[in-house]
């Protein structure tokens, strides 16, 4: 059987550790083939070898059954391989057309815009992509920016497309459109390697190769497998998808928010008259499409953003306007959504990050000096307790995978907080195994008597974890509902602006 | 063909090799420059080494020359580690000397054990005031610290110019102005060490200050916050660190260190207030801090190297018969190669087979 691309016995080591160990992989013409595995399983390493970012230590790559040597992305493009990265490589101040043709011209100094426009028009018509070539990239929503990246690859005559976690930045609706386009591309003979760790996406592919610790665990026809089997293959053990939440009676009110209003950079209201309360043993879910005030709400609650009006009571104290330091000292823990920007210092090692914010605490000092021995010991305990995959506590946090970085934040906040836990998108971009873990930890805090405020874009998470769900739309709470007698569809409608349920 | 790949981990041996190559390359290019002036390169370098380290006297001169440069270098380290790009060391060196001079007048007649710490504190206070001002401009109005510190440099340097020429501190009775203050009384000279006539007690300060900086940066909560501020201020803000306060502390500490350089130079070397002795020390400090990899110990080594160059320059000019202005050129060449080495140390060289 002919293959679009084949990899035989590929091994790539970093500092003696095999990121890819004797990997065999083949891509058939016109199929979507998933590379599925946890962060650090070797998906990115394999695709980087195929696209010429890394040179494999061993193994051979074949394109259309011909052995090839790919030493750089230029070689890969010459062989008809295109790649769309998770983080786009676009110039926001350039138009769509400029972004596609600048730097991709085969020869000469002159940009032949008219010819390029014609070629792109033909590509877009073929796949039903409707995009204005003269729009500036900064004007485009994220989903459209991704189209630009895909167009760039197609413009360079790619026949094999590598998509690296393409839906990580997309809304559910945008993801559906993307899969639609991918279907059309395959129908026209393109072959797609889809890197993902979302089961729902794997199930839409033709075949899937599961990687674990750099090795291929299995290559399966998607129709012959199930999400449960795939999750088990990926993690190496059975994963429970059903969240078992103990029945607990809510205790006294921990935090009460009344009439909270906050303004953005240009004075626009980002929070409008937001009111709710959360009690001990209770998880309040915050649902909403990203950018509807969730982030601002968390920022006000943890003290990094000022509210223009309204009150926040923590136990018996008005805390609106207090600094993050004061709130941390009152037991407020915060898991921010942008973990590498707001939750961690990437250059600091794991141990340093585990005490970030508490570096002045007497527990971690001996006299005026930092007690690095005590911190190292604590770190080793926490690395074990929270199963942070790292060589030791001296590894820079930026070198860890997203899931392990998130575990550092969770470990730190869980260790130091008392009473209130703010968790904004704590499971975004994480592996199935880690998600399960984070969720169980949040439930543990609930059992311990914490009040938890949890925002998530995955409604199924909220329905499994939350005791009540507040739905946000354009900075307002559309209503607070009980997940036990509300459907996902109803909450979806509230996310689009319908009012329902109670507002405290 | 060879190719450079970023290293995932630091390699001590490779780092050392990079800097060794930088020294060799710097000397080689300097030799070319010297040769182009028609000088005997071997003789010039011999004179340089002789003047820098050839005798106890030469070593003493090197130490004395290195002292203010290292202190200004440490001022750079503290600020740059927090990614505060203060260029105010030059003005703060001047302010340190001026504050020290004022302190000398206020504290005149005090016993030495009070007088010397007192005048140094006066000098440091002046530098701290400048640092505080730049920090407030940044914290309150968002003024970039590069702009504010450069402007403050001009302000301070011209203030000294006015004070010495026509102002209250000019030398009395001089018919023509030399832009200098009268000589300090001899009891205001920093005491000499080992009976030397040039090795003043102030040469100990850079070593004490470097040790203190090293401990503060790597072992204290404040140092943790300084490093964190440089890496990711947003995360620190989220975790309760008062960014404005930390910026103020860093800028004041940096100002104090640079000012200490000026005060030491006044009481240890010049013994009178004049711009000639101070000019360029702050900028040299920036270079030395950078070459030292923004580490206190590295800054001491780089500062001693620069001190040696400055002290050897005299010999070079006399014995080697070359213009002394080549010394800054050699310093520039060295800086260039050291910066290259700093980059090289972070990469590894791989051989790529031709296809």
Image: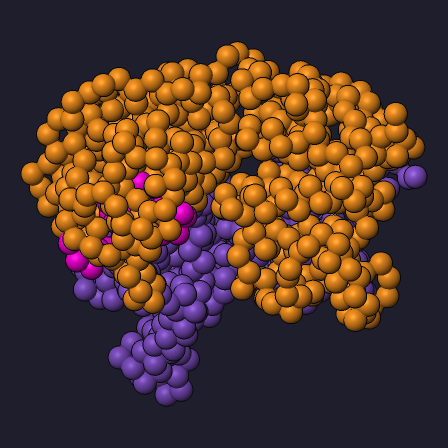
Chain colours: A orange, B purple
Q: Residue at x 66, y 31 (%)?
A: A205
Q: Residue at x 76, y 18 (%)?
A: A22
Tell how many labels. Answer: 0
**In this orientation, which residue lies closer to the viewer: B85 or A127?**
A127
Q: Is residue A223 magenta?
A: no
**In this orientation, which residue lies closer to the viewer: A491 or B153?**
A491
x and y, in percent, of residue A123 in the image: 76, 56
Q: Is residue B148 above or below residue B258?
A: below
Residue A268, quarter of the rendered image: bottom left
Farthest-out residue, left? A316
From this viewpoint, is residue A254 visible? yes
x and y, in percent, of residue B222 in the image: 32, 41
Q: Where's the C terminus of chain A, which quadrant?
A: top left
Q: Residue at x 73, y 58 (%)?
A: A125
Residue A52, quarter of the rendered image: top right
Asked whether, in this view, residue A82 is left or right of residue B324, the answer is right
Q: Residue at x 78, y 37 (%)?
A: A30
Q: Is residue B222 above or below residue A238?
A: below
Q: Where's the N terminus of chain A, which quadrant?
A: top right
Magenta segment boundaries in residue numbering: A286-310
Residue A7, quarter of the rendered image: top right
**In this orientation, which residue lies closer to the viewer: A213 or A462?**
A462
Farthest-out residue, bottom? B175
Q: Is residue A293 magenta?
A: yes
From this viewpoint, is residue B335 visible? no
x and y, in percent, of residue A472 in the image: 31, 48
Asked whether, in this view, residue A429 is left or right of residue A6, the answer is left
x and y, in percent, of residue B76 in the image: 45, 53
């Amino acid at each position: 059987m002919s293959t679009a691309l084949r990899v035989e016995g590929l091994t790539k080591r970093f500092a003696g550790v095999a990121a890819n160990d004797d990997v065999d992989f083949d891509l058939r013409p016109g199929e979507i083939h998933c590379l599925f595995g946890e962060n650090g399983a070797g998906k990115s390493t394999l695709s980087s070898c195929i696209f010429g970012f890394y040179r494999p230590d061993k193994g051979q790559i074949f394109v259309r059954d011909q052995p090839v040597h790919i030493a750089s992305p230029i070689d890969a493009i010459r062989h008809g391989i295109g790649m769309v990265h998770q983080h786009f490589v676009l110039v926001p101040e350039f138009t769509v057309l400029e972004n596609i043709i600048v730097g991709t011209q085969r020869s000469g100094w002159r940009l032949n815009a008219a010819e390029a426009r014609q070629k792109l028009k033909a590509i877009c018509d073929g796949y039903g992509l409707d995009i204005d070539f003269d729009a500036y990239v900064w004007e485009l929503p994220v989903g459209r920016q991704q189209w630009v990246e895909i167009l760039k690859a197609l413009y360079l005559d790619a026949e094999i497309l590598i998509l690296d976690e393409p839906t990580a930045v997309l809304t559910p609706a945008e993801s559906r459109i993307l899969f639609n386009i991918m279907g059309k591309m395959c129908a026209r003979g393109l072959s797609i390697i889809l890197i993902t760790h979302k089961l729902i996406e794997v199930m839409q592919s033709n075949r899937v190769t599961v990687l674990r610790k750099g090795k291929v665990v299995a290559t399966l026809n998607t129709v012959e497998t199930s999400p449960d089997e795939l999750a088990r293959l990926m993690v190496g053990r059975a994963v429970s998808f059903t969240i078992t939440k103990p029945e607990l009676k809510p205790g006294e009110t921990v935090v009460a928010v009344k009439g909270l209003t906050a303004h953005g950079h240009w004075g626009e209201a980002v929070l409008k008259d937001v009111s709710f309360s959360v009690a001990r043993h209770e998880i309040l879910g915050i649902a909403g499409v990203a950018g509807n005030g969730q982030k601002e709400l968390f920022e006000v609650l943890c003290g990094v953003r000022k509210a223009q009006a309204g009150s926040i009571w923590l136990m018996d104290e008005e805390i609106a306007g207090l600094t993050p330091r004061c709130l941390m000292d009152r037991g407020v823990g915060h898991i921010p959504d942008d973990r590498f920007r707001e939750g961690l210092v990437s250059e600091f090692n794991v141990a340093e990050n585990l005490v970030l914010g508490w570096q002045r605490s007497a527990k971690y000092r001996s006299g005026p000096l930092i007690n690095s021995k005590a911190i190292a010991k604590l770190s080793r305990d926490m690395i074990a307790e929270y199963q942070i995959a790292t060589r030791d506590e001296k590894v820079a946090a930026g070198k860890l995978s997203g899931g392990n970085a998130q575990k550092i934040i969770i470990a730190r906040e869980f260790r130091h907080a008392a009473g209130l836990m703010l968790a904004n998108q704590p499971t975004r971009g994480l592996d199935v195994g880690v998600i399960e873990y984070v969720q169980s930890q949040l439930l543990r805090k609930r059992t311990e008597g914490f009040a938890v405020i949890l925002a998530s874009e995955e409604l199924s998470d909220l329905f499994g974890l939350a005791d009540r769900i507040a739905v946000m739309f354009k900075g307002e709470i559309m209503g607070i509902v009980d997940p036990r007698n509300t459907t996902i569809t109803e909450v979806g409608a509230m996310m689009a602006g319908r009012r329902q349920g109670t507002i405290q | 063909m060879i190719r450079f790949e970023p290293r995932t981990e630091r390699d001590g041996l490779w780092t050392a090799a990079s800097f060794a190559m930088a020294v060799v390359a710097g000397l080689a290019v300097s030799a070319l420059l010297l040769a182009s002036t028609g000088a005997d390169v071997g003789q010039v370098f011999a004179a340089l080494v002789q003047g820098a380290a050839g005798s106890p006297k030469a070593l003493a001169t090197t130490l004395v020359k290195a002292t203010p440069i290292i202190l200004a270098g440490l001022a750079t380290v503290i600020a740059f580690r927090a990614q505060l790009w203060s260029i105010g060391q030059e003005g703060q060196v001047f302010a340190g000397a001026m504050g020290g001079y004022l302190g000398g007048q206020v504290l005149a007649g005090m016993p030495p054990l009070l007088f010397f710490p007192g005048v140094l504190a006066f000098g440091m206070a002046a530098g701290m005031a400048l640092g505080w001002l730049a920090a407030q401009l940044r914290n309150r109005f968002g003024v970039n610290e590069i702009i504010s510190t450069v402007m403050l440099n001009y302000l301070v340097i011209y203030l000294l110019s006015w004070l010495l020429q026509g102002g209250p501190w000019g030398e009395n009775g001089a018919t023509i102005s030399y832009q200098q203050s009268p000589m300090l009384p001899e009891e205001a000279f920093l005491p000499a060490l080992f009976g030397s006539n040039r090795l003043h007690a102030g040469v100990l300060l850079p070593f004490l200050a470097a040790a203190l900086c090293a401990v503060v940066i790597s072992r204290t909560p404040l140092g943790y916050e300084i490093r964190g501020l440089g890496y990711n201020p947003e995360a620190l803000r989220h975790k309760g660190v008062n960014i404005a306060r930390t910026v103020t502390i860093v800028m004041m500490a940096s100002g104090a260190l640079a000012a200490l350089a000026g005060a030491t130079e006044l009481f240890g070397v010049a013994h009178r207030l004049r711009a000639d002795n101070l000019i360029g020390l702050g900028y040299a400090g920036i270079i030395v801090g950078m070459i030292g990899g923004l580490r206190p110990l590295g800054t001491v080594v780089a500062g001693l190297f620069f001190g040696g160059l400055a002290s050897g320059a005299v010999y070079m000019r006399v014995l080697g018969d070359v213009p002394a202005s080549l010394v800054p050129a050699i310093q520039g060449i060295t800086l260039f190669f050291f910066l290259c080495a700093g980059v090289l140390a972070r990469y590894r060289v791989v051989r790529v087979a031709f296809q």
